[in-house]
Every structure is written in structure tokens, then in C-alpha cells.
Image (cartoon, helix red, strand yellow):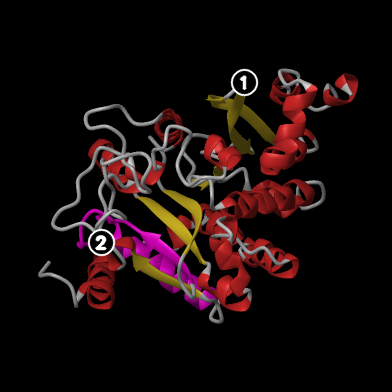
Amino acid sequence: MTELRALTHIKVIPEQQNLRDAKQRRLLRRRLPELIELERILAESPQPFSAQVTATVPVGALDLPIYRVEVGDAPADRPALLLVGGVHGLERIGTQVVLAWLRNLANRLRWDEHLAERLKHVRLVVVPMLNPGGMYLNRRSNPSGVDLMRNAPIQAQGQSSFLVGGQRISPLLPWYRGKLNQKMEPENLALQRIIDDVLPGRPFSISLDCHSGFGWRDQIWFPYAYRRRPMRNISSIMALKLLWEQSYPHHDYQFEPQSEHYVTHGDLWDYFYKRHNRRTSAPWLPLTLEMGSWRWLRKSPRQAFSREGLFNPLVAHRHQRVLRSHLILLNFLLDACANYGHWVPNSSEGEWLRAAARTHWYSKGETL
């Protein structure tokens, strides 16, 4: 087995696997099969793939790796696409969608010259499982009880939603933000290091964070969550929405600001986005995919009696449908990044797109 592991060009995989004894490997196969699948995809991947462990999360005797995966080696003056999954451990489907796309890329790169050429023009960085400890323990939070999406040092403006907007009462309750004036959790600091390494100096970037949540439709959220006002790059968000709808008019995604649903403290992407804007004027569009889980519950009401069933499709054919249905979106984002110069608005276009965005998303809210 050790000799077979050594055949892969991604040496971090056998290094990590050799740290685990037989009991730990059995536990991972049962509790965290997504990690086993990720390591298998990477071990079998073609040469354009590379990976490193950006941090490890201790859970009992295990040290669970947070992998940073890169595909291609686009230079620093090209745009970037950052893909993240597994922020909430219960929402396993987010990581599974990311893994399905990585396997699709790995297999296509063996024959698709167009894809290989595309990856020379976009730096692709993927964090398939930001919260491996939460996934292993089958909980929303990380092993310390902190909700990573409520952990950033940013306060909501105005009244936030009770509990769901973030609370510091107890890690035994959901949406716990962590202690006041304490550093962000190690998982979030690892993601911050990746963002600081990948995004600066690039002319344009998009990120997509894959979640599941309550709703009848799949939604694509964008900042802000901490206030009900447009983000700096709202004209580019509107341009991306129109580009998607023109390219795929029969889609089933709903674009909207996260604050349309609730206002929260500590939103991770709000914090990273504002931090990025203080350092550079290059546009970055941080998006969140919220896969609507109410449809799965409506079709299989028994899922409501399972913690995993509240956030993930458990029926095999629905699970497979979800895994394949988002491949088009992820491929679209890769192509949109590579061709950003053809659709990101200039100053004159930006004015009317911003006005259109205000009318479309914010006209019913507070005065802007």
C-alpha cells in the first residue's frame, strides 16, 4: 500500500496518510468519507493539480488537514477563482459539490485541451473542506463550538436577527461567534492566509462558498450580511447576473444580497471583502451558493428527523442530481473569470448597472 501511495505526484497525500494508523483510517472512512474521496481525487489527478496542507485541526488523536488545492499555474497578472466548501460541518453537500467538480476537472484535463488552455488564464484555488473537524463530528460549528461564518471581527449595523445573527452566550447554542476580542478561529485564519496569498495584485477575482440552507430555490448570495446597503462592486454583481441569465435563461438560481434574509454579526465574507477593498481597488466578487434544502425535505419528509437530512439530500438519485446540477455554474464562473474584460462594466456602464441593482434589490429597504 505504501508503494502505491508513493506513485502520486502530490507527495502531501502519502505523507498525510502515513500519519494515520489502521483505527484512524477506519474512523475516517465512517465519519469523514469526503476526506478519503478528496485524497483519492488528488492522488489520481494529472500533473496540473497540486496540493498542500495549509493547517491541521486536532480532533482527539487525529490531526485533520485543511487542503489547499490548485489547478494550473496561471501567472500573477491573471484573474483568480477561489472555491470553498465545508465551512459548516453539517452541510456536507457543499464539500461534495466541490469534490464532484474537482473530479470532473481531473478527468477532463486528460483529454480537454481547451480546459488546459483556459487554466493558463485563471488561477484556480480550491479549499474543499475548511471545517474538517466539524464534518468529522457532524456539527455545524468547528470542534471548539464556534460557527466559522459568525467568527469574523465585524459588527452588524442596526438590529441583527436573534441568535441566527450571531451570539456570544454559549458554544452550546448554534451560531456562536467565539469570545470577544479573541483571534479568529484557526480555520478562518488559514483561509485568510490563502486569500492574502492569492488575490492581491490580480486584476479581478471571484470566490464561491458552497453551503446548503433552508429555501425552495438555490440562491447565490453576495455581501453584505452586516448591513442593508449595496457593496462597492454591486454593478459587477448585476453584470454577472445578467451574463448568467443571458447564457443560461432556464436556470433556477436566485441572485440576492444576504441581508435580504437576515443581518448578522461576524460574517466571514463581509470581513474579507472589506479588508480586501482597503488594500486594493481591484474588483473581487465574493459569492455564496445556498442550496435550498426545503425541496429535499418536501419530497422526503422523513429527512426532518435527521440532523444530516435537514441540510443534505439523502435519497440517492436526488443526491446525484445535486452533484451534477451545479457543474454548469462552476464552469461558468471559471469562464467568466477568464473573460472578465468582456463583461465587467466600465465607469459609464457601471452607473446604470448600479442604478439597476439599487432598484432591483434595495428599493424596498432603507434609504441608501
Name the amino acid type tagged 1: Ala
Residue 231 sits inside the magenta stretch: yes
Specify whether residue 345 is in view: no
User: Mark 2 falls on what kind of element?
Assistant: helix
Q: Which mark is residue 61?
A: 1
Left or right relative to 112: residue 61: left
First reached walking from the N terminus: tag 2 or tag 1: 1
> In terms of depth relative to the viewer, which is nearer, 126 or 30?
30
Q: Where is residue 17 drawn, in percent x and y?
A: 74, 24
Asked where in the image residue 326 lies, by quadrant, the reply is bottom right
What residue sits 47% from the left and 37% below the top?
A: 142
Residue 244 position (above or below residue 82): below
Which of the 4 image quadrants contains residue 236?
A: bottom left
Question: Horizontal placement of 322 versus 364: left or right?
Answer: right
> In x, y percent, where is residue 67?
59, 32
Q: Quadrant of residue 354?
A: bottom left
Dot 1 surroundings within 10 Å: few (below 14), some, or many (20 or more)? few
Image quarter (top left, top right, bottom left or bottom right) of the N terminus: top right
Range covered by the magenta-colored residues: 218-247
> Residue at label 2?
347
Query: Is residue 49 found inside the magenta-colored segment of the image?
Result: no
- The mark closer to the camera, 2 or 1, is 1
